[in-house]
Every structure is written in structure tokens, then in C-alpha cells.
Image (tube, rainbow, N blue to C red):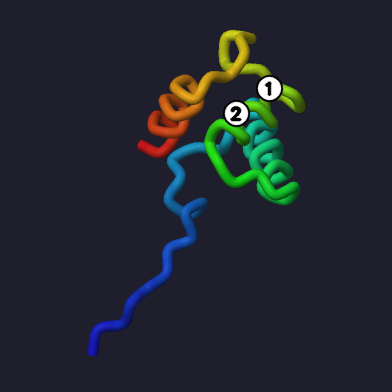
């Protein structure tokens, strides 16, 4: 009988997260904790609370999605 195995996503990482990635993850968790549910709300929240985008620029929906796609590879 085959057994499904659960893989904790952090176990599959090839490297440790950067400070920027950790700060962004914390901001996303806080946003969800405050009831943010949509991408526009999330981007607005992160623009208010930080961190700034990778080049110090304000987040857009496109820049957020592009970074998430890159980090998810």
C-alpha cells in the first residue's frame, strides 16, 4: 500500500531565506491576520507597512506576482 508523504515546503529549500524575504513574509502574515483577502488589498497593505519593493520602489500587483513566481521556482 502506497503511503502519501507530506513534505514541509521549507524542507525543499535550496538556501536560507534572505532578510528581505523574511520581512516580506512577516508582512504578508500580518496582512492575512488583519483580514486582507485580495491581491490589491495585500499590495496596499505592504506598501503601507513595508518592506519596500526590491529596488526600493512601491509594490504593484505585477511586481508582487513576479517576485512570488520567482521565489516559487
Q: Residue furthest bottom?
A: 1
Q: Residue at x 62, y 14 (%)?
A: 58
Which residue does the image show at 41% across and 25% down from the upper left? 66
Q: Residues within 10 Å of mark 1 (few under 14, many from 20)?
A: some
Horizontal placement of 71 versus 27: left or right? left
In this image, 38 relative to 1: left or right?
right
In which quadrant will I find the C terminus? top left
- Name the quarter where the N terminus is drawn: bottom left
Query: Residue 34 appears at what percent x and percent y?
Result: 75, 47
The residue identified by callout 2 is: 43
Please name the residue that numbered disc 1 is placed on.
47
Q: In the rendered view, tell whether residue 11 sits above or below residue 24.
A: below
In the rendered image, residue 4, in percent from the top left (x then y), is placed at 33, 77
Front position in the image: 25 or 31: 31
Q: Is residue 34 left or right of residue 25?
A: right
Residue displayed at 25% across by 84% down: 2
Circle 2: is it few (<14), some (14-19), or many (20+) Cα within 10 Å? many
Image spot of residue 29 (x, y percent)? 67, 45
Element carrying mark 2: helix
Does the residue at mark 2 contact the one at mark 1 (Cβ under 8 Å)? yes
Who is closer to the viewer here, 61 or 13?
61
Horizontal and vertical percent position of residue 17: 57, 35
Residue 35 versus residue 10: which sits nearer the camera?
35
- 1 lies above or below 52: below
In this picture, is 24 found above or below 2? above
Q: Secondary structure at mark 1?
A: helix
Q: Give the camera-side residue of 51 and 43.
A: 43
Above-or-below relation of 43 to 12: above
Residue located farthest toward the left when viewing the structure as drawn: 1
Q: Which residue is drawn at the image coordinates 74% and 24% (left, top)?
A: 48
Amino acid at each position: 500500500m502506497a503511503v502519501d508523504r507530506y513534505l514541509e515546503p521549507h524542507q525543499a529549500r535550496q538556501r536560507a531565506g534572505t532578510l528581505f524575504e523574511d520581512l516580506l513574509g512577516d508582512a504578508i502574515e500580518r496582512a492575512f491576520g488583519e483580514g486582507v483577502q485580495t491581491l490589491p488589498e495585500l499590495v496596499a497593505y505592504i506598501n503601507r507597512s513595508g518592506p519596500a519593493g526590491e529596488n526600493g520602489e512601491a509594490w504593484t500587483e505585477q511586481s508582487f506576482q513576479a517576485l512570488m513566481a520567482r521565489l516559487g521556482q
